[in-house]
Amino acid sequence: MQNKRVKDVMVPLSEYGVVDQNATLLEALGVFEEAMRRRDRSRQPFRAVLVLDENKKVVGKLGQLAFLKALEPKRNVLGDLSKLTRAGVSAEFINSMMDHYRFFQDDLENLCRRAIGLKVKDVMHPATECIDENAFLGEAITKIVAWQTLSILVTRGDDVVGLLRLSDLCQVVAEYMKTLSE
């Protein structure tokens, strides 16, 4: 494992679902489902689609959490609650805030109906974290833990060539640990 690099574990961009930033949430859902149908069954399932700009450059990710968050019309008030929890804000306070603003209180049908036409660019997570394809897995583990993220874009120069997912990284580490115990 000491010699394994990010490119040995990443999911290549060609295998991942990609969607234009101006696509609707419903269109992104179709791309996600298609990527799931054609994925390598020996790997963990996909949990996001990558978002491309007009120049076909990756500018973000639309993951399952962002997809659900998009259902809430007041989603911008929500902000990034994970930052609050990391800063020590209690779960009770966050729950109180959710109750106060009455998030997700509408009927599920109404929430879904409103979200169908939303543009991906309005609900995606902007692409900020990245790692070079030739980086060693130790560096990748450090970044995923430090950033507390489920995936990191993998680059070759200025181009995104894949996605390194926490699930794939954990699978590789677990397999390595098993071989060490034998």
Image: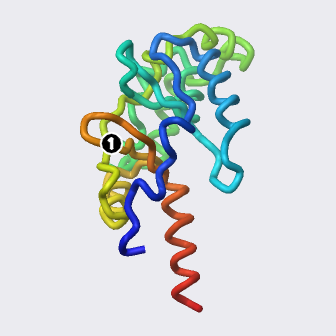
Where residue 87 appears, as percent x and y from the top left, is 31, 49
Where residue 54 appears, as percent x and y from the top left, is 38, 12
Q: Does 80 appear above or below 2?
A: above
Answer yes or no: is residue 65 visible.
no
Q: Does 91 appear above or below 54?
A: below
Answer yes or no: is residue 77 visible.
yes
Between residues 17 and 143, which one lies in front from this camera angle? 17
Q: Does 96 appear above or below 172?
A: above
Q: Residue at x 53, y 34 (%)?
A: 63
Circle 1 residue: 155
Between residues 119 and 5, which one lies in front from this camera angle? 5
Q: Residue at x 56, y 23 (%)?
A: 102
Quarter of the image that includes the C terminus: bottom right
What SS does tag 1 mark?
strand
Q: Quadrant of residue 16?
A: top right
Q: Quadrant of residue 81?
A: top left
Q: Residue at x 59, y 21 (%)?
A: 28
Quarter of the image that includes the N terminus: bottom left
Identified by mark 1, the residue type is Thr
Where residue 41 appears, as percent x and y from the top left, is 71, 51
Left or right, residue 28 beside residue 162: right
Q: Residue at x 51, y 87 (%)?
A: 180
Give the total number of marks visible in the rendering.
1
